[in-house]
Image (cartoon, rainbow, N blue to C red):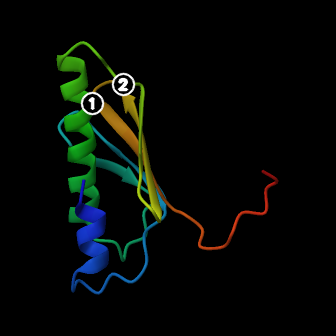
Amino acid sequence: MGLIKKQAAGSSGLHRLPSGAFTVDAQGNLVSSTVPQWFPEASVVQIGQQILAVFKGAAGIRLPFAELKVQYETFVITAREMRGGAIIFLSPKSAAPSLAPS
């Protein structure tokens, strides 16, 4: 799951992280997406395939996940299994400090 880190640090010209959601079918094909068009579709597909691999691996050892959340320092990927496919949410974390009481 080092894709986001590689893209943010690489020379791909990616200066901001995407926000949106997308769905993939059981074969990893992109079904629908609200991810901005400037974010490469190949990267969306790769994230989807990695998420599906985690869900399939967990099911293979009889520990199926209903939801998977991957938190990076500045980015969160939340995925929910959907009949072999998945819905995946991409969310950059806000750089502003939280105003919520602790």
Q: Secondary structure at mark 1?
A: helix
Residue 50 location (% of width, % of height):
22, 45
Q: Nearer the viewer, residue 47 or 26?
A: 47
The residue lying at 47 percent from left, 65 percent from top is: 74
The answer to whether residue 34 shows anywhere in this view is: no
Q: Percent x, y for residue 102?
A: 78, 50
Specify the farthest residue to the right: 101
Identify the image quadrant of residue 15: bottom left
Q: Are marks 1 and 2 in contact (CB under 8 Å)?
A: yes
- Would you identify the image quadrant in which residue 12 lies? bottom left
Q: Report the residue at 43% width, 78% height from top.
A: 16
User: Is residue 38 visible to the viewer in this orientation of the structure?
Assistant: yes
Question: Upstream in the sequence, badge 1 or badge 2?
Answer: 1
The residue lying at 33 percent from left, 24 percent from top is: 83
Badge 2 amino acid:
Phe
Residue visible at 23% across and 33% down?
Answer: 26
Identify the secondary structure beneath mark 2. loop
- Callout 1 crowding tier (Cα within 10 Å): few <14, some 14–19, many ≥20: many
In the image, what residue type sits under mark 1? Phe
**Is 29 drawn above or below residue 54 in the view shown?**
below
State the mark number for residue 66: none
Residue 27: percent from left, percent from top: 17, 37
Q: Which residue is mark 2?
A: 65
Residue at the limit of the structure toward the front, as seen here: 102
Q: Which residue is mark 1?
A: 55
Residue 35's spot in the image, x, y percent? 42, 63
Q: CA distance from mark 1 to mark 2?
A: 6 Å
